[in-house]
Amino acid sequence: MRDNVHNLAFRVAIAPPATAVADNTPMVGNWIDRSGFESLTFGITTGALASGAATFTVLVEDADAADHSDAAAVPDVGLISSVAGVAPEAAAGFTFADHNVTKKIGYIGNKQFARITITPAANASAAPITAVAVLGHANLRPVA
């Protein structure tokens, strides 16, 4: 059987695995260039979240300009939720109780660039979080 994820997708780290923000500083991902790919999914993984009141919201932005000067928040119609009936960015968000979980959000907009930002609120302890972008449905296969 053909391994579609291995041969047809490309992964890009967008936040370092050692990230452990201990305040409310937003974690802004790298811009992902979708050239040559038809789909994009952001994966977010948490470690042990120590702050007892923290919440983490997710924002997806997209842009066409190479300098991202036209960046704007993506409307829900340009995103795929991981939970039926829940707004995409709300479904990708998490709280202090979400230890060692993986969340995802899909991008189906038509802009060339996209990125995510994870913004903590009421966070007073180390919050180890990492994110990855999975580009899929490549125009040229297999993907190297």
Image: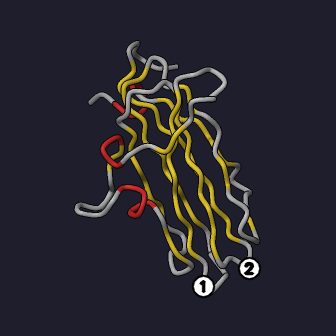
Q: Is residue 20 above or below residue 1?
A: below
Q: Is residue 102 above or below residue 29?
A: below
Q: What amino acid type is highlighted by mark number 1?
A: Ala
Query: Between marks 1 and 2, how big is the CA–CA gap?
Result: 9 Å
Residue 28 locus on image (x, y percent): 66, 49
**Which residue sits at x=47%, y=61%?**
102
Disc nearer the start of the sequence (1/2) = 1
Using the rendered view, name the quadrant where residue 18 is placed.
bottom right
Q: Secondary structure under badge 1?
A: loop
**Which residue sits at x=63%, y=68%?**
120
Using the rendered view, name the quadrant where residue 55 is placed.
bottom right
The residue carrying mark 1 is 53
Q: Is residue 1 left or right of 66 when viewed as pictured?
A: left
**Which residue sits at x=49%, y=19%?**
35
Residue 17 locus on image (x, y percent): 68, 53
- What is the number of the mark on residue 124? 2
Q: What amino acid type is highlighted by mark number 2?
A: Ala
Coloring scheme used = secondary structure
Using the rendered view, name the quadrant where residue 26 is placed.
bottom right
Residue sitting at the far top: 140
Q: Secondary structure under badge 2?
A: loop
Residue 85 locus on image (x, y percent): 23, 63
Q: Are marks 1 and 2 in contact (CB under 8 Å)?
A: yes
Front-most of residues 95 and 66: 66
Residue sitting at the far left: 85
